[in-house]
Structures are given as C-alpha cells and as structure tokens.
Image (spheres, helix red, strand yellow):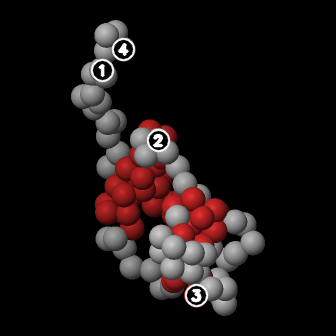
Amino acid sequence: MRVTAELCVLDDDLGVKGDSGILRSLQTRAYFLEQPDKRIVFHYTPRHCSRMNQIEIQSGILARKAIRRRKFASAEELPSKLPDLIDYFNAAMAKPFRWTYQGASLEA
C-alpha cells in the first residue's frame, strides 16, 4: 500500500490500519487501489478465473522454455522478437494439455 502510494507520488496520509484513513478496512484499501487517477491501478480477478489461469500457464511455459534460454540486446528487443518465439514454441515444443479433472457432480 505504502509502496503504491510512493510510486504514484501521493503525499496523502494513508491512516492507520484498522483505525483510520485509506488503511482503515479492506474496502477502503481496495477502493484506493482501483481508482484510475494513479500511475498504478490494481485490477482484481476472481480467484478461480479459468481463462486467466490458462493465460498464466501459457505465459509461464513460454517464459521457461523460450524466453529464458535466449539473450536479448535490450529490454526493447523482446517485444519485437516475441511473435517469432511464440511461432518457434508452437512449432517445436507445444503439446496439447491433457485434462484430468472430471468435475464435481452438480447433483446433491
């Protein structure tokens, strides 16, 4: 919370956790973090958001198997090389996921 306030160059008093100000409760902290008027804005997703999980899984695999094994001249070079890395990964290393979850019955 304080790091976010520092990075957003906010001089407001954050208050005391559980007592006053922005830090008073979870709701006041969430409201502060979600406001679009700051440089850093938090976006909350559901805990079990399956679409996000798939993106995280794919990003992790790509990072471990394609990005970490390469050297880039600069941080700016990575975005221009990313489509080529994805094509290489899809052609050489990608395999379909084998789902093992059978799901829980909705019947009581």
Q: Residues within 10 Å of mark 3 (few under 14, many from 20)?
A: few
Residue drawn at point x = 56 percent, y = 80 percent: 15
Tell me the distance, in whole angstroms, between the alpha carbons under discs 2 and 3.
30 Å
Viewer can see residue 25 = yes
User: On the image, numbered disc 1 is attached to which residue?
Assistant: 104
- Find residue 20 and report its horizontal and vertical position in percent: 57, 75
First reached walking from the N terminus: tag 3 or tag 4: 3
Residue drawn at point x = 34 percent, y = 36 percent: 96
Tell me the distance, in whole angstroms, between the alpha carbons under discs 2 and 1.
17 Å
Q: Residues within 10 Å of mark 1 (few under 14, many from 20)?
A: few
First reached walking from the N terminus: tag 2 or tag 4: 2
User: On the image, numbered disc 2 is attached to which residue?
Assistant: 49
Element under label 2? loop
Tell me the distance, in whole angstroms, between the alpha carbons under discs 1 and 4.
6 Å
- Find residue 101 and report its horizontal and vertical position in percent: 27, 28
- Find residue 98 and report its horizontal and vertical position in percent: 28, 32
Q: Amino acid at mark 2?
A: Cys
Residue 6 numbered tag: 3
Report if the CB atoms under discs 1 and 4 are less than 8 Å apart: yes
Q: Amino acid at mark 1?
A: Ala
User: On the image, numbered disc 4 is attached to which residue?
Assistant: 106
Which of these two is toward me, 101 or 89?
101
Mark 2 vs mark 3: in front: 3
Residue drawn at point x = 67 percent, y = 77 percent: 39
The C terminus lies in quadrant: top left
Q: Amino acid at mark 3?
A: Glu
Element under label 4? loop
